[in-house]
Image (cartoon, rainbow, N blue to C red):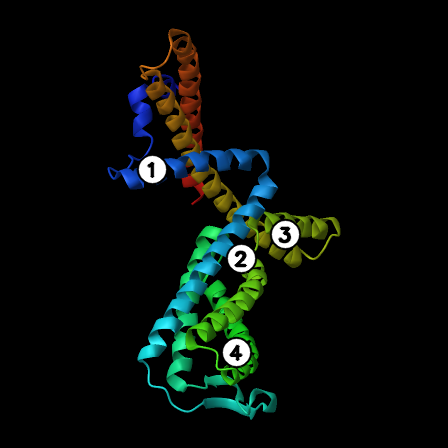
Amino acid sequence: MSEEIKELTAEDLQKEIKPLSQNAFVRFFQKILRWWLGVWYGFCDKKPKLSATVYKVFFFVVFSMGVTIWQFLIMAIVPEFLPKTEEVGWPMIPIAAAGGNSFIIFGDAKGWATFICFEIAVFTAQCINFPLQRNITYRSHGNPWWQAMWYFIGWVLVSIATNALWGVCNAFLLYWNVPDVVNGLLKTILTGGISMVIFFFIFMIIFPDNNKMAKSSKAKYEKLVAANAPAEKVAKAEAKMKEWEEKAAKSNAEKEFVKAKSQVNASVMTYNALVKALENPKLSEEEKAAYPERIEKAFAAAVEAIKVKNEKEIAFNAVK
């Protein structure tokens, strides 16, 4: 441990964490979040593969459901202020079982304004979803323009598929006189739910796991070298391997630095809680006697967490 770390005082520990809000309500949830992050990253150390899967699935679902709610709010509110006309669109194929209501992919039974409103709702939802999924869920360091292009292509194809499915469902819902709000909710759930499932697999392609790709590209390179492949082919494989190894190094360093900062917060909070508990006048002398050792251990753990955080920060700055 460095001399700088050894000489840390209790006051220095407080400087390592972001001050809590003066608002009691906000401060309460900040404490819960910091405690939880400490628990979570401890779990990450014990179960790295499981925690990585849980992390991705959790944020993928949360962000996907969040933008789905955004779509519903737009479709529940905005169409009320739009002019309603006769059904328009393509391919306008009557469905006898639905009372003659038409099957429409591009258009809407209430006019172009409602259809355009829905498409705007879906498009803006994807504009919100893409950066959240890329930067938080998958922590991708790939080319954002290339990823955005394929995301857009995927969105267009998914939209056509879900619009076609909705074209059938909507004809029957209109025939059954389902209220507009319920109709909008069902449309959001159906199209949003299907989109979420399809996009899960799209994300796996455009946001590949950097560590897996680094391992795969290295294996491919080594295989070509062992097979005495042409120099040009080996050089390309080596360049690809180094590219993925660099991306993996960036994402790993970022993840480790974020984890280390959270563990500092958690360890300092534990230390503070023990110090505060010792001030409780209701404690017996016997109970107080046990606290100095616990406080000393908590202080040492916080100092060690700070040391690790400093090391991870240096490593992160070296590759970002």
**Alpha-carbon distance for marks 3 and 4?**
39 Å
> Which circle's residue, 3 or 4, is located before the other in the chain?
4
Residue 15: give x, y in percent of width and height: 30, 29
| Label pair 3/4, CB-CB below 8 angstroms | no
Marks 2 and 3: which is nearer the front? 2
**Alpha-carbon distance for marks 2 and 4?**
26 Å
Residue 140 seen in render = no
| Label pair 4/1, CB-CB below 8 angstroms | no
Under tag 1, what secondary structure?
A: helix
Say above or below: 150 vs 265: below
Q: Which residue is mark 2?
A: 207
Horizontal side, residue 241 vs residue 188: left or right: right
Mark carried by residue 217: 3
Under tag 2, what secondary structure?
A: loop
Residue 55: give x, y in percent of width and height: 52, 47
Q: Residue at x 24, y 37 (%)?
A: 22
Specify the quadrant of the image occupied by residue 126: bottom left
Say above or below: 255 vs 269: below
Marks 3 and 4: which is nearer the front? 4
Residue 252 seen in render = yes
Foreground of the two, 268 or 219: 268
Under tag 3, what secondary structure?
A: helix
Q: Which residue is mark 1?
A: 28
Q: Amino acid at mark 4?
A: Asn
**Alpha-carbon distance for marks 2 and 1?**
35 Å
Residue 4: give x, y in percent of width and height: 35, 20
> Which circle's residue, 2 or 1, is located before the other in the chain?
1
Foreground of the two, 94 or 248: 94
Under tag 4, what secondary structure?
A: helix
Mark carried by residue 163: 4
> Which circle's residue, 3 or 1, is located before the other in the chain?
1
